[in-house]
Image (tube, rainbow, N blue to C red):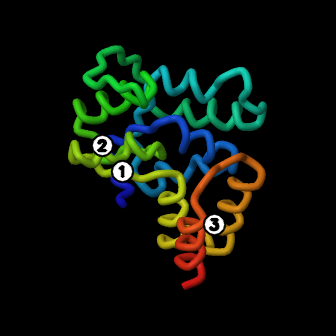
Amino acid sequence: MSGEKNVVIVCDASPLIFLAKLDCLHLIPALLGENIIILQCVANEVLSPSCDASEKRRLQDFFKAVEIVDASHCAYESQTLSRSDCLTLTYAVANKAAWLLVDERLLRRIATEEDLKVVGFLGLLIQAARNGLMTKASVKTLIDRAISDHGMHISISLYQKLTEILCE
C-alpha cells in the first residue's frame, strides 16, 4: 500500500460506513493516498437517513477532503451487484484507479479480473497495524466492535485468520 498523493483511490460504500462508525476514515489517505474519489451515488448511500448523527458528521467532514464525482455511465450490469457497485467499478476501471476500497466479494473479484488492486475495511485495518498507525490490540478491538456493535458479518475462519495475524 502506498500513501502517494498522485494515485487515484475509488471508495465503495461499505468500507466508508464501517470506517466512519469506528472513527477511522483517516486511514484511507494515510495508507492509500490523498486523491480519493467517491461517486455521488455512494455518498448518497452512506449519508442515508438511517445514518447515525456522529457517523454522518464524520462522513461529511471526510467528504470535504475528497472529490465527489457524479457518474452515470455504467459498463457493467449485474443481477447481484447494485447500480452503485456497477458505477463504482466502471469509474475505477475507466480511470485506472490505483486502489478500489470495497468489501463486496463479487465486486472485489470482478475488480481483480480488471487488474485493479482492491482492499477492504478489514485489510485497511490490518495494514494500519502493520504500518504502525495503530496497535494490533486496537485493531483487534475495532474488528470486534464492528462485529458486535455494528453488524459486520465475517466467517469464523476469517476471524480466526485475522486474530492470528494480530497476535503475531
Q: Is residue 8 above or below residue 143?
A: above
Indicate the amino acid at tag 2: Ala
Q: Earlier in the sequence, mark 1 or mark 2?
A: 2
Kindly report the distance in space between the C-alpha atoms of the residues bearing marks 3 and 1. 20 Å
Quadrant of res 110: top left
The residue indicated by pointer 2 is: 111
The residue indicated by pointer 1 is: 118
Residue, x 68% and y 60% (percent of image)?
142
- Rendering coords of residue 85 (x, y %): 42, 30
- Residue reaching furthest top? 72
Residue, x 31% and y 28% (percent of image)?
91
- Rendering coords of residue 1 (x, y %): 36, 60
Q: Are marks 1 and 2 in contact (CB under 8 Å)?
A: yes
The residue indicated by pointer 3 is: 139
Residue, x 43% and y 45% (percent of image)?
101
Q: Earlier in the sequence, mark 3 or mark 1?
A: 1
Quadrant where the C terminus is found in the figure: bottom right
Quadrant of res 167: bottom right
99 or 57, which lies in front? 99
Indicate the amino acid at tag 3: Val
139 or 64, which lies in front? 139
28 or 81, which lies in front? 81
Q: Secondary structure at mark 3?
A: helix
Q: Is residue 42 above or below residue 133?
A: above
User: How many numbered marks are there?
Assistant: 3
Residue count near mark 3 (Cα–Cα under 10 Å), binned few <14, some 14–19, many ≥20:
many
Kindly report the distance in space between the C-alpha atoms of the residues bearing marks 1 and 2. 7 Å
Q: Secondary structure at mark 2?
A: helix
Residue, x 72% and y 29% (percent of image)?
51
Which numbered marker is on residue 20?
Answer: none
